[in-house]
Amino acid sequence: MNKNDSEQMTSLMLQNDQYVEAKSLENADILIFNSCAVRETAENRMFARMKDLVGRRKKAKKAVTLVLAGCVPQYEKESLLKAHPYIDIIVGANSMEYLPSLLDHNSQTPQIMIKKNKDTSIIKSSPKRTPFDQAFIPIMFGCDNFCSYCIVPYTRGREVSRTKESILEEINALAGSGYKKLLLLGQNVNSYGQSLYSHYDFADLLVDIHETPFIDEIDFMTSHPKDMSDKLISTLARLPKMGKEIHCPLQAGDDELLLAMNRHYSVADYIKLVTKIRKEIPDALISTDLIVGFPGETEAQFQNTVHAVKTLGFHRVIAASYSPRKGTAAANLPNQIAEKTKKRRLLELQKAVQQYAFGKHPVEESKLL
C-alpha cells in the first residue's frame, strides 16, 4: 500500500510539466519521503536518513524542498515541525492528492495538509507504475477493526470503499499497457463495500473484475480472518484467474493473546477457516503475519504461536516483534516485553518458519482439531 502511495504521488507530480524525475538525490530540488508508521524502527530510520540528506545538502549549499508524506504525519501532525523544523511540506496519507498544489503555492512557511479519512472521489488512475508485471489497484482505504497493537486506523482513517465503477474504470484503462496481473489493495479487503452498498461485496467485485478479458491473474491483500465469508471462499474457488496465495494474518497462536489484540477470533476459528479454504481450494497457499513479544506474552503463549507454524503448514510467514505505537491500546498495557526477549523469540520463530513453512508439513483436520 505504501508503494502504491508512492506511485500515486509520482504520477501526480509528473502530470505537471513543471517537474521531472531527478537522476540522483544530489540533483533533486524536491525530496519526498513517504513514511510508514507501523513499526518504530522504520520511522526512526526515515528521520535519520532525512536529517542526513538535509545536512549534506546544506553543506553543499544546495537548496532543497523537503516533503514528509504518508502515515507518520497522520498521527504526529503539527508536532513534527517542532522536532524537525527543516521540513517544508507535511502531507498525510489521505491527502497526498494535494501535494502538487502545495508545491505550487510556494509558501515561505511550512505547509500542512492532513485529512482524517480518504476522499475516494478524487482518486485517479496511476500511469507511473513501479512493478512492470503487476498493477496495484486500491479498492478501499482505512480500517475499522482497531486491533490493539495497530496504528493503521489512526493513520489511514476509517474504512472507505471506492465505487465499483471507479475500480473497473482504472482496470480497463490498463488495456494495451501490457499489465496482465492485478494486486487489489485494502487494509481489510474482505469488508469492501460495507459502507457503500447493501447487496454488493468483495466477492461480487471479484466476479466483475474477473470478466476483464486482458487480465490473467488477480491477487489481493490483506484479509481479516473474521470477515472471510463462505461466499468469498466459494467465489475464489470457482474463478480460475484468482491467485492461489491467500494472505490471512493469524498474528498469534494463543487465544488470550488474540483477545488482548482485539482480533475477534480464536485459534480454533482460524484453524476451521484454513481447513475450509484448503477443502474448497486444494491448491491454496495460506500466508500469514505473526507478532512476538506482545505485552504480557508468556513463554507458553509464545510457544503456542510456534506450534501454529509447525502445524498449519503456511506457505509464507511475515514475522515481527511487537512495536509499541503511541495512541494504540497496547502501548499502555502492563508487562511490556523486554527487547532482548523479543529478539530471542523472533529468532526462534523464524527458525520454525524456515523449517515448517512453505507448505512442507500440511496436516489433516483431525490433527488440527
Image: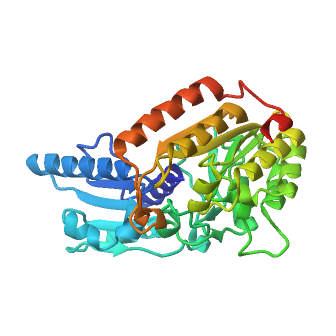
Q: Is residue 306 visible?
A: yes
Q: Is residue 105 visible?
A: no
Residue 133 rendering spot, x and y as whole percentages: 63, 37
For the C terminus, the image quarter is top right
Nearer to me, 219 or 263 = 263
Nearer to me, 239 or 150 = 150
The vertical placement of 315 against 155, above or below, is above
Residue 30 rendering spot, x and y as whole percentages: 29, 55
Q: Residue at x 65, y 59 (%)?
A: 188
The vertical placement of 249 against 316, above or below, is below
Q: Is residue 303 left or right of residue 213?
A: left
Q: Residue at x 27, y 67 (%)?
A: 80
Nearer to me, 318 or 201 = 318
Q: Residue at x 57, y 46 (%)?
A: 301
Total labels: the figure holds: 0
Residue 303 rendering spot, x and y as whole percentages: 57, 38
The vertical placement of 199 against 233, above or below, is below
Q: Quadrant of residue 214?
A: top right
